[in-house]
Amino acid sequence: MPITIREVAAEAGVSQATAARALNGYGSTSAAARERVARAAEKLGYETNYIAQALRAGVTRTVTFLPGNLELPFFATIAHRLSDALEDAGYLLAVSSSYEDVERERRIIEGMRARMSPGLIVASAHRDMHEHLRRLNESGVAVVAIDRSLASDGIDSITVDNYALGGDAARYFIGLGHRRVGLVFDSEDIASSPDRTRGAVEALREAGCEALMVRAGTDPAEAESCVRAVLAEERSRPTALIAFDSLMTEAALYAVREAGLAVPRDISVMGVDDHTLYRLLEAPLTVMAQPVDRIGQDAAALMVNRLSGTGPRGVVDVRHRAELVVRSSTAPPAG
Amino acid sequence: MPITIREVAAEAGVSQATAARALNGYGSTSAAARERVARAAEKLGYETNYIAQALRAGVTRTVTFLPGNLELPFFATIAHRLSDALEDAGYLLAVSSSYEDVERERRIIEGMRARMSPGLIVASAHRDMHEHLRRLNESGVAVVAIDRSLASDGIDSITVDNYALGGDAARYFIGLGHRRVGLVFDSEDIASSPDRTRGAVEALREAGCEALMVRAGTDPAEAESCVRAVLAEERSRPTALIAFDSLMTEAALYAVREAGLAVPRDISVMGVDDHTLYRLLEAPLTVMAQPVDRIGQDAAALMVNRLSGTGPRGVVDVRHRAELVVRSSTAPPAG
DNA sequence: CTGTTAGCGCATTCAG
DNA sequence: CTGAATGCGCTAACAG
């Protein structure tokens, strides 16, 4: 049984209220009282009961993180950064994956209210179903979006400029001389995909190049076969592939290998999101690297600011730029 | 402002106690009352306040997960499985990394008490400093160890037989004809390392082979240079390397490449823990694969059992077997 | 079957 | 400067 503030008060020979004041440093207490309370607390090993505090305050010190899938390196890294930074500020991180399912997302958010979590950091699951997030935000819960900006819904966002990312990736291939580029993405419904592909498509179109849309879904095996299908016919085969997240990257790489194609001789491949293993691949992978650590830290800092009321006035909408990291998986087209 | 049970009671025209009974299905209530309460709750959008419930009950429905480092794929995957399975049972997962630092581990555990978390799933940071875990467990918090068994401390454990893992790995190389094998591990102080290396060392010794201990630390760059040092002199160079976790695996791979060695021609490399990208490496990597999903699921299931009091009597100590997955990074030695 | 009542541990208001 | 008293939302013991 944990020690309560009452026991501390008794031990110190003061009232419970005085003990509380002394312990939390508000109101006014005599130095002597503070001293005795501190000593008593120390002696008994008193610890604040956050639950009782939360019930009284109406909020806990737990921030919720709702990624698409915690297993993806991008989200795992973000979670890691968040957990760290939030802990330093006295918050705990609770994590739950949405699996890109809006219903699940809604349920989890409902749960937040019951758990009195005052803040949510979310990679919104769906392209445009975020009424629930907007409402949550307006109801006073601090919401910070990552991966995809929800600034237009009045929600603070720390993201990468996904449109620019797509454009930069495409332009790199255009500069290399590619005329037909395959764009591998999971689904138009998911968060960042539409912006990325749109950026690429427009850049390609502008340069008079062809964009092959490869909607590959979120299942790895299925994704691989989708890409394989595009690679099947030699005549219409793209000379370059852009995979818009780490799952798609692996799918593309596997499909290319299965098709017996050499990278970058037969086909160039670019991924999004870097990984320490990419440099060790048969063809070290060229990627558009998102500043993952940065995003995590920024999101955490912003959240802490919002929760402590020290944040900026308006809606924050930081858009970092993804960085092109050229390695050996990309080259001018063969023909 | 959320709806309270009192408002529901008022709306339904019953007392608050009756509303509670109807809502939670305990005690006895008339069908009519239940019906009206349910309707009222529905109408007002009532949701249980878990915090109030927790204060009353003395525990929350939040399980704490304390991995060495959430960023590592092994732990990220476990976290993912845990989060999933626990949610289904009505629990939330709170995550915090120990960074293999016992002090940090202790602090986080202290925090649990204040947060009334009734369960801890932990990859214990230190080889033998786990008095705090034992005490926590004895004080009534359900503790489940992963990665390294703490069964001898009376703590339920779901792990892999790390001793066997090391032995199996070594024996595979012995069978291939290797006589000098480098064992790359982070630190003797950390959780699973000693068991794994011990298993390998004993197997090697038994076969009259030489074990080169490479204590590489937890910093990637430093780890790489430690391995490089061992590779420097050709005469004493091992013909095979076993890297005992994913960080060590990358360090070994990088070091080998930097040293200008070809895998497996000049040196064989085996990793521990599988990864989807390993099949795409220049030399697809042979590994000892831990059943990660299985560990996560088992740990979650056991935790739920313990928390609901339906668990087995004694201390659970499940030791899964790691599986050897042979790919192309291992071969008989050249000479 | 149901209402009344008393806390869970804490922060805070109101007297003193 | 300090103590007594109140209530956050909920559960459970106790009457009725």
Image (tube, coloured by chain):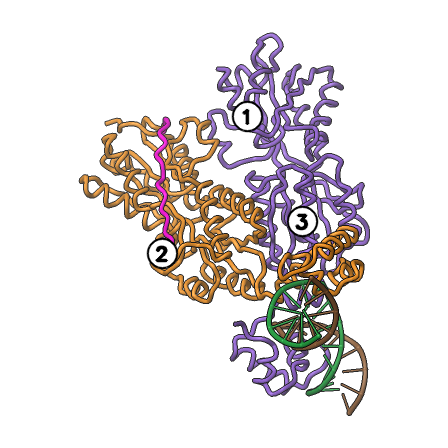
Chain colours: A purple, B orange, C brown, D green
Q: CA distance from mark 1 to mark 3?
A: 31 Å
Q: Upstream in the sequence, badge 1 or badge 3?
A: 1
Which stretch did the figure color magenta?
Answer: B316-329
Q: Position of residue D3 (x, y in %)?
A: 69, 87
| Kind of residue sitting beneath label 2 | Ala
Instruction: Nearest to the eye among marks 2 and 3: give it.
Output: 2
**Which one is in front, A10 or A178?**
A10
Mark 3, secondary structure of its residue: helix
Q: Is residue B29 above or below residue C3?
A: above
Residue at mark 2: chain: B
Task: Identify the residue at image location x=30%, y=46%.
Answer: B163
Residue at mark 3: chain: A
| Kind of residue sitting beneath label 1 | Ala
Indicate which disc residue A251 carries: 1
Q: Which residue is mark 3?
A: A298
Task: Identify the residue at image location x=75%, y=40%.
Answer: A130
Indicate which disc residue B151 carries: 2
Task: Identify the residue at image location x=47%, y=44%.
Answer: B297
Q: Is residue A24 above or below residue B165?
A: below
